[in-house]
Amino acid sequence: MGKASSGELVQGTLPLLILRTLASGPNHGFAIARRIQQVSREVLRVEEGSLYPALHRLEVQGWIASEWRVTENNRTAKYYRLTRAGRTQLEREATRWNAIAEAIAAVLREA
Amino acid sequence: MSAWRTLLHRIGYLSRQRRFEHQLDAELRFHIESRADELEQHGYSRSAAEARALAEFGSRTRVAEDARAAWQFRWIEDLVADINYALRTFRRYPAFAATAVACLALGIGANALIFSLVNAALLRPLPYPDADRIVMVRFTPPHQPDQKLGTNAGGYFFIREHSRVFERMGVLRITGFSVAVGESDSVAREWLQGGWASPGLTDVFNVQPVIGRWFRPDDTQTGVVISHGIWQRLFGGRPDVLGQTIRLDLWRGVVIGVAPEGYQTLTPDVDFWVQQPDQDLARALRSPNRLFNVFGRLRPGVTIEQAQAELRTLERPLGEYLPMNDGWALDVDSLREAYVGYLRQPVLVLQGAVFLLLLIACANVAGLLLAQALARQREIGVRAALGSARNRILRQLLTEHVLLSCAAGAVGFALAWLGLRTLVNTGLSAYRDLQNVTLDWTVVGFAILISGATALVFGILPALQLSRVDVVTVIRDAGRAATASPGRSRLRDGFVVMQVALALVLLVGTGLLVRSLLRLNAVHPGINPERLLAVQVPLPRALYANTGGNTPAGGLLVRFDTRFGDLTERMRDRFASVPGVRSVAATTPPPLGGRARRVLFRKVRSLSDDRDPWSSEWYAVTPDYFETVQTPVLQGRTFTKHDAQSSRPVVVINATLAAQYFPNESPLGRVVQTDVLDDAPREIVGVVGDVGQDRYQTSPAPQMYVPRRQLPYRMDMQMALEVLVSTFVVRIDIDPAALVSPLRDAVREIDPTLSVSSARTVEEYAAGQLQELSQYATVLGVFGALSVTLAVIGILGVMAQAVGNRTNEIAIRLALGAQASSMLGLLLGHGLKMIAAGIVLGLAASLMITPVIRSFLWSVTPTDTVTLTLVVGGLALVALLACYVPARRALKVTPVAALRGE
């Protein structure tokens, strides 16, 4: 397991990122990881060691659901999609995160 | 909602576990393959891409564990997995599992068994309200600090009047009665112990009868409260027992109550209680006889220490008020201490012994685990390499240990149950205070507790060792037979040393007890106890009359009439006519059973004698006594029918008395005067051999015998009661058991109100004196033998492994011409070092520990050289043998076989 010090996720943000990624449509774990990496312009790297446990925890909590589908490469993959509860959770978490981020930015600017 | 949903998900997971594992695997595989696809597009070959993707992914095991954790009640899942894993391990190493469980079961079982004794004797609460406030007050004579006796009446009244710490006080006097139920005179009598209870005694215990009531001061008839046991046995547990007649000697009593089960005043064999008014006690106010047991209920908030402190201040005034109490100490003890305090040391010593045994078992199993660790090194290493965290492996190993000790606890408890049954059937009945030993919930709890503790003790070191496995070494050495690391071997050797040392401690203790027993048994008792029955027949109290006066010492004075001597003679003659009886004589107490009366005497008409009076045991016997018990007559003669009331008073002394007090002269014809009331000066007519009445006496006691026919008519009541309980010694030709019932019939024929209180062989009395010691030695011996067995198993294991590791080396050296004997020496050297270290440690520990059993030893010191030599020699021999067997086997291996085994 390699270390990615620059791209290490802030504690507790991975579930939020997963939920947001799935808001654009169902996808499998590998694609979720890649998408987070792309959108963040390679700043955020998702470790497989954290990704799959996080996906399973979200599923147990009922915020995402899963089904098996065949990919374009003819492989079967586990696709996750956002549930209604997950959407609510995403809104709540996103609001909270934005508030915190703004607050931190304000402190950095003016303190 | 989330909590419920999570719970449902998790429960669902439990039922679909296998499918989940499969899907999780597919999901992770898909990820790796997708990454490989990506790499392939970047120009990697397919195989290189797959290898790189796999490497990047890291530990699949750990990701799977973490993902799984989301779905699980983690600890339950882990536990179930660990238990399954442990069970698989046990199946893979069945010999190891069986040995470990067996060793631990022995240790735990022995502990549970002995703890059930501790529990019954020292822990279980006594069945009285506020039992911790009930105390006994006992008297310690001057210069005999380990004696605790009852009080005289005067002492009781004085304490009751002057102490402030007691809410209530009462006394109990215990005497035997010839008892019959109902009005008829033809009902067979039975000899039972009854308690005379003073007013206040029932308030001290504060327990109400289950039926009826206690006595009241204004009762007009003799009210009797019977024990629960007698209610069941003599009255069949009938509810209409109240008002029934119960005959006590010649009195007629009425049952007014039944005491609850377990109600116990002083001893459990007191079977009924009658009232003794304070006026009766007051008549004996100046009597020195200590017949009364004082019980008191402390005021609320008063501690035993405070009560003790107050009574200390009363000692001196009491001695001034009643000089016979001068110098006596007053002791306050809790009821439990007074009842079973004498059991504390023996049972705690036993508990200590089985604790040592358990430690040996733990050391043994720890050794086994270390040996097993060698075999499992790779398995654990592979698990660690696959990404299992160290504490996860540790937990797995500890689960195995807890499982082992749980199994051992269950087996051990079964063993304890069997052991207790054996103990109850063989010897426990002799301990009247250990009648209710059971494996109750307290014992179960204790067994569970020590099982758990055991798992930690034996498991922690090996588990730490094993979980510290070095992955690199394991993988590098893969395929080669594993060898023990030096640290682990040393640890294992240490466990063996500990086992040998602990076993030695137990063996030394046992050895000292056995040697005491052998010494005691080697002492000739001075009589021939074979085919000798001692039949006790308490004669009725009607044979004496209360004079109403006091002896000069203050005791109640009673007067015997001639019926006493006549009745004794009649019974003696009747017994002699029973077929199978060779000769009969009467005495008090039974030979080799019970404490003899002691008297003081002086030589009479000896000008040189101005010393203090001497002390001697004193027996009142009929003619034919010495012939019957077969004590040799050394000088002069014994008694005949002609030594009667009207003839010259005579006495026969034993060899020790003759040697000590008549060292340079013949005692025959000398005259002595005893301090027995009204006793005339007696002429010594014979000298007989010494009798060891008390088998624990280290040197023979002075003894004197007087003819029963020549006893004074007036006696102190206490002595009268002793003399009345006559013992008939019967020398017989046939099986003693066949004679008991004809002898009982003979007694009833002479007087239907008489009863035989006991009929035992003198051999039984002799063995009875040593019973405690011999049972103690037996139990310790069993534990000692077990400890040696365990130690031998431990040595065998270590040696087998040490030898196994060097099989190749040995085979090759032998092939190259090394001498078998020098190789043997090399192998044995290792064992010898361990044994020697164990023995040195064990001896040091023994010297520190064995003094706790000093009070059980008889003319043997805790450092007895013979015992120590034999025990050390024996243990060393057995241990060496345990080393020799595996070593010998290794030398027989051919080089070819050894290398093929590689």
Image: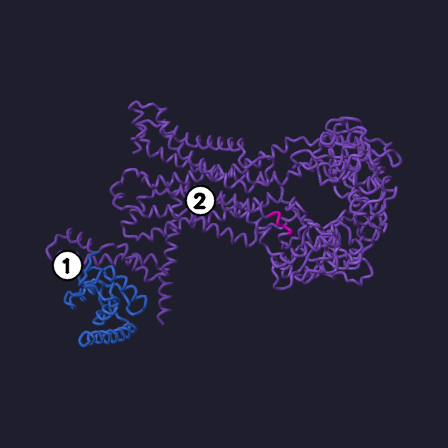
Q: Magenta segment range?
A: B338-343
Chain B on-screen colour: purple
Tag 1 or tag 2, which sits nearer the N-term? 1
Residue B731 visible here: no
Dot label at residue B38: 1
Nearer to the camera, B806 or B208: B208
Q: Quadrant of the C terminus of chain B?
A: top left
Residue B304 in the image, given as x and y percentages of width and height: 61, 58
Residue B395 in the image, given as x and y percentages of width and height: 37, 52
Disc 1: host chain: B
As measured in the structure, the alpha-carbon distance from the residue carrying label 2 to the one carrying label 1 is: 58 Å
Disc 2: host chain: B
Nearer to the camera, B859 or B67: B859
Query: Is B716 placed left or right of B851 in the picture?
Result: right
Query: Is B182 placed left or right of B400 in the picture?
Result: right
Residue B585 in the image, given as x and y percentages of width and height: 80, 34
